[in-house]
Amino acid sequence: MLKIFSTQLNGIFSKIQQDNEFAFEDAARLLAQTVLSHGTVYFTGKDEMEAVNAEGLYGQEAFSNAKPLNTKEISQLTRVDTVLASARFHDDEPVLSLLQEIKQNTDASIIFLASRKEKGEEAAPHCDAFIDLMVKKGLVPAENGERIGIPSAMAGLFAYYALFLTAKEILEEYED
């Protein structure tokens, strides 16, 4: 089972990278602009996707200007701030409501990491950049026919690092 899982996971990571190439570039530019403008990168995530928050806030390679999003302080977000939100699926109603509230009441940029349930579905309309995490179901078939091993958080962390590394590369260009 482990070999199947690791092979499938590598496939997911490759697909995330390939299918989101332009979205990664756009999102990383938003993050770099936030850093250069001395804005704040706010993190919010739901359920297992809080792993992305933990990495972005407290990890070895966290953004120095990162904070958890406090929903009571949304009105204080400015145009130099960016919200990085993550959810298992892109149609998560509480997350979409939060993104809509941010978009309607602030000029902050929004980056949303989530999986589309079906290929071709429209991404959340309230974001400036959407990264499709490509995890729709479990990766490993069990003996009873069920599929297990749903790596939503791992896909979110992969996307976080892709964004972090790309933003860092952009910021290094500005330093030269």
Image: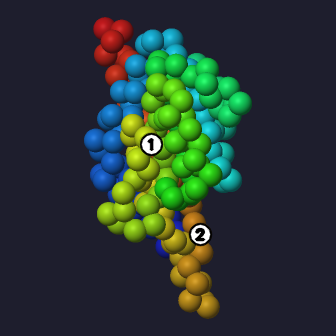
Which residue sits furthest front? Answer: 104
Q: Quadrant of the C terminus?
A: top left
* Discs 1/2, front: 1
Say what amino acid the circle numbered 2 marks.
Gly
Q: Secondary structure at mark 2?
A: loop
Residue 71 showing in the rendered view: yes
Q: Secondary structure at mark 1?
A: loop
- Dot 1 or dot 2, earlier in sequence: 1
Q: Up-down: is 47 above or below 160?
A: below
Q: If the image is split into quadrants, where does the N terminus sit?
A: bottom right
Q: Toward which corner of the image does residue 130 lie, by quadrant? A: top left
Q: Which residue is mark 2?
A: 149
Residue 139 point in image, percent of width and height: 51, 72
Three-letter code, disc 1: His
Q: Which mark is residue 61?
A: none
On screen, 163 above or below 96?
Answer: above
Residue at left offset 62%, top offset 45%: 45
Q: Residue at x 33, y 42 (%)?
A: 23
Identify which residue, 175 or 31, lies in the foreground.
31
Q: Nearer the viewer, residue 58 or 126?
A: 126
Disc 1 target residue: 126
Q: Position of residue 134 (x, y in %)?
A: 43, 60
Measuring 49% from the left and 35% from the top, which residue is drawn there? 103
Q: Is residue 81 left or right of residue 119?
A: right
Residue 168, quarter of the rendered image: top left
